[in-house]
Image (spheres, grey):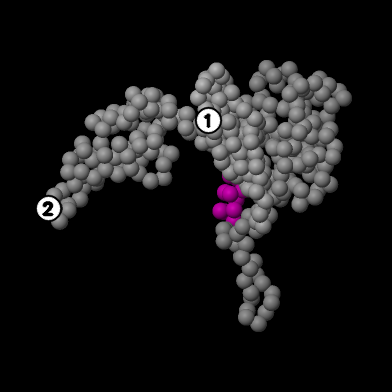
Amino acid sequence: MDNQNFNCEDIQSKIGYSFKNKKLLEQAFTRRSYANEHSECADNEVLEFYGDKVLSIYLARWFEQAFAKEQKQSYYSEQKYYFSQKNEGELTKLFSYYSDTEMLSKCIWNLGLETYLFFGKSDENNKVWDNASVAEDLFEAILGAVAIDSEWDFEKIFPVCTKMLGAGKYAENYIRLLQDYCRDNSYIFSDDSFSTLIYLGGVTYTCTLTLRRSQCPYPPLKFKSTGNTAFEAKMEAAKKACKAFERVYMKDCIGGEINPENPVSQLQELYQHEWIDEPKYIWDEEFDEETNEYFWICKIYLESFDAPFFGRQTTKKEAKKEASIKALKELIG
């Protein structure tokens, strides 16, 4: 095998499983195009088949444990019927969500596993590492390889499924975004500092990321977070760092500080520069019996926030300004 980037230790750390047969791990990453050019290699297509079935079993078992309810036939009988908190249609939707191409490819990309693929010239010309279906195939092939290597020991297979699917909860690969930012802005992304706390219910991982600018006299920046896995802790720490830098960029975009006289324009400026989605304004009017006045209520909805930002003033203009200031404070701190 001639992929010099291939790193068994990194892959095994990310999926939470150590292979007895390292050739199986290599095969999981081998595309047919590569095997066609290297007759001594086997491709990953059969492993994909097995991995697809493994994922189905894992999801069915997970749903059964999460939503199962047993109910006795009668007070005098120990026999029980099986009931589920979700019906067949709801379970089918959940299954589709966790097994579709978008979810599985996001897991692979967030873990950074696509960089270890072995592919031939035709795949290279088509840049398959950016193809969602290729990433999905890789996800399934890894599970298939784990199943065979573990001799179908589901006590070893299921934790791998849990860990790999857990990477899909992040909309972005914050580790990669942070690495790109550091490269473009002369920051040195230091080795990660990890600590673990073992307790009765499991293990908590803590990750501290240290960023320092080359030839800069100021102390380094540190971002610390925790998670149920080392990957989750690192991703959360990187997410904190990305959000902090994002606030700096947004501040620069609006001139460095919130202008209390013109916050509506500043919010629009962030939208025009694609830092936020388009703000949606909802209006209401109410009468205050105590003051005998009418008040305008402005609600600003931003897609990344669950709740709206409120402004309540006697004029529409002032209500909109108040709500905009609250939104800006939340966005840039």
Foreground: 189 or 13?
Answer: 189
- For the stretch drawn in magenta, the main secondary structure is helix
Q: Amino acid at mark 2?
A: Asn
Q: Is residue 97 magenta?
A: yes
Pointer 2 with pointer 1, Cβ within 8 A: no
Q: Which residue is mark 2?
A: 292
Q: Is residue 244 left or right of residue 66?
A: left
Q: Which residue is mark 1?
A: 221
- Kindly indicate the quadrant of the structure image that contains residue 173: top right
Foreground: 230 or 177?
Answer: 230
Q: How many marks?
A: 2
At 73% from the left edge and 34% from the top edge, which residue is drawn?
Answer: 11
Kindly tell me whether residue 173 is visible in this rendering: no
The quarter of the picture where the C terminus appears is top left
Kindly tell me whether residue 26 is visible in this rendering: yes
x and y percentages locating residue 214 in the rendered image: 56, 19
In the image, residue 72 above or below residue 51: below
Q: Amino acid at mark 1?
A: Leu
Label annotation for residue 307: none
At 65% from the left edge and 39% from the top edge, which residue is drawn?
Answer: 194
What residue occupies the far bottom of the structure in this picture? 76
x and y percentages locating residue 44 in the rendered image: 77, 33
In the image, residue 67 above or below residue 41: below
Q: Give the CA distance from mark 2 to mark 1.
A: 53 Å
User: What secondary structure is marked by label 2?
Assistant: loop
Tell me which label, 2 or 1, sits earlier in the chain: 1
What residue occupies the far left of the structure in this picture? 292
In magenta, the rendered stretch is 88-100
